[in-house]
Amino acid sequence: MTEKQTWSQRFESALHPAIASFNASISFDIELIEYDLTGSQAHAQMLAQTGIISPAEGEELVAGLEQIRQEYRQGQFQPGIDAEDVHFAVERRLTEIVGDVGKKLHTARSRNDQVGTDTRLYLREQIQQIKQLLREFQGVLLDIAQQNVETLIPGYTHLQRAQPLSLAHHLLAYFQMAQRDWERLGDVARRVNISPLGCGALAGTTFPIDRHYTAKLLHFDDIYANSLDGVSDRDFAVEFLCAASLIMVHLSRLSEEIILWSSEEFRFVTLKDSCATGSSIMPQKKNPDVPELVRGKTGRVFGHLQAMLVIMKGLPLAYNKDLQEDKEGLFDSVKTVQACLEAMTILLREGLEFRTHRLNEAVTEDFSNATDVADYLAARGVPFREAYNLVGKVVKTSIAAGKLLKDLTLEEWQQLHPAFQEDIYTAISPKTVVAARNSYGGTGFEQVNKAILAARIQISE
C-alpha cells in the first residue's frame, strides 16, 4: 500500500516523503497493536452479529486478526513507516491474509473512534499494573514500619528539628499518600472504561451497529453518549497524567528524604551496594542514584501533563491531528511511573538500612522535647501560653549555657516554675515524648500499631 493508495481517489499523488515521515505515528503507536487487534475483533464480531457482514466473514476476520497477533508476538510482523500508523498496518496485513474480506473490517468505523478505543484499552490495563505496583510499594513500607515502631527519628517542620517521631509513623505517612494514589487511579479507571467505539469520525454511522455489544465484548462499563465527545475526549488521559504526577510527587518527596538521610550530615540510613554507585574520581563516595533518578524523572511526567493540557486547550470539535501527540507522553508517563515504583520498592526492601542507633541518638541532641515541657506545666494548671513563654525562656538560656533540657538540674527547673518535679526527666525522655502522643493518627506507639494493622487489612481487600 503506497501513501497514495492509503487515501481515497480524492488524492492524485502520494505524500512528500518527508511529510509522510512527519505524519507517521507507527514508530510509537505500535505500542497499541495488541489493543487494536482486540478492539478490531470485537468490531468484526459486532458487524457479523448485526448482519452488516456475514457470520462467516466475521469469523474469518477474527481469525485473521488473531494470526496477526501471533505474528507480532513472534517478531514476524514489524510494520514500517509506509504503514503510517498501527491501524493501517493491521488492516493491510489482514487483507493480505484473508483477501478482500479484510477490507470490510473498517465498515462503520473511523480511525478516530478506533484510536480512542485502543488508547482506553491500553490505559485500563496499565492502570491495573500501576495499582499492583503501588500495593507492593505499600507492603514494603509496612514491613519496615512494623520492624521500627519504637525506633525514633527526628521530626521536622521547615527542615528544622520539631518533635521526635516513631520511624514507623513517618513511613506510614508515605503509605497513606500511596493509598490515595491507589484510590485516585481507581477513580480515573472508571472514566477510562467508557467506549467510544461506534462514534465514527464524529457523527456516528448510518449502519445498524450495536455499540453496547462491542462495549460488553471489550468489558467497558459504558459507552459515550455523544459521538463528538467520544472521538475528541482526552479528559481521561489528562486525569491519568494528573494521578501519575501525584504518584511522582510522593515518590520524589520520599527520594529527597532518603538522599538527605544518606548524607554524612544526617547518617540516618546506609545505602547498600546493590542500589548505589560510586564516583569516577572520589573512591570514598557512595551515591544515592535511585532516589536521585526518581526525583529527576518526576519532571518528565509533569511535562507530559502540561503538554497534554496545552494540546487540548485550543482544539475545536471534533478530532484534530494534534491528538496524535497524546500518545508518546502518555506511554512515557506509564513506563516512568512503573519503573520508579519498582525501583523505589527494591531500594526500600533491599537497598538501604536504617541506622537505628544513630536515629535514637539523634532525638537526644536537640530541643524537640520543648513542647512536652510546656504540656507538662499545662497539665499542672499553668495556662499553656504562659507555659509556652516560660519554656521559650529556658531554651534560650540553655542554648547560651551549652546545655540541653535533659541536662538541667531539678533546682534549675524549679527556679523556672515550682510545678516541676523529679518526673520531668521521664516526661521529656524521647520515648516518653513519642509514646504520649496517643491521639488518633498520632505517633504514639499504640496508635502506630493500630495504624499498621488497619493498613494491612486495607491492602489485603
Image: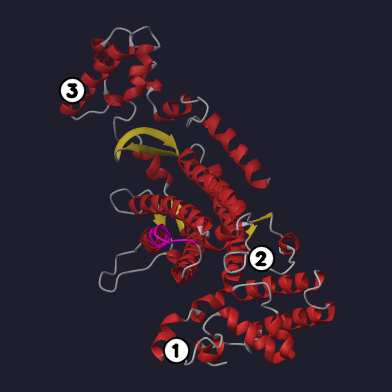
As for residue 314 lying within the magenta part, the answer is yes
Q: Which residues are magenta?
A: 305-317
Position in image of residue 334 (x %, y %): 51, 64
Name the residue that disc number 1 marks. Answer: 15
Give, as a three-letter code, the residue at label 3. Answer: Thr
Residue 461: image quadrant is top right
How far, Cα to Cα, is label 3 from label 1? Answer: 82 Å
Q: Disc 3 or 1, which lies upstream in sequence? A: 1
Name the residue that disc number 3 marks. Answer: 397
Name the residue that disc number 2 marks. Answer: 198
> Foreground: 238 or 447?
238
Prevailing secondary structure class for the magenta stretch in the rendered image:
helix
Q: Disc 1 or 2, which lies upstream in sequence? A: 1
Q: Disc 3 or 2, which lies upstream in sequence? A: 2
Residue 70: image quadrant is bottom right
Q: Is residue 181 above or below residue 57?
A: above
As for residue 452 lying within the magenta part, the answer is no
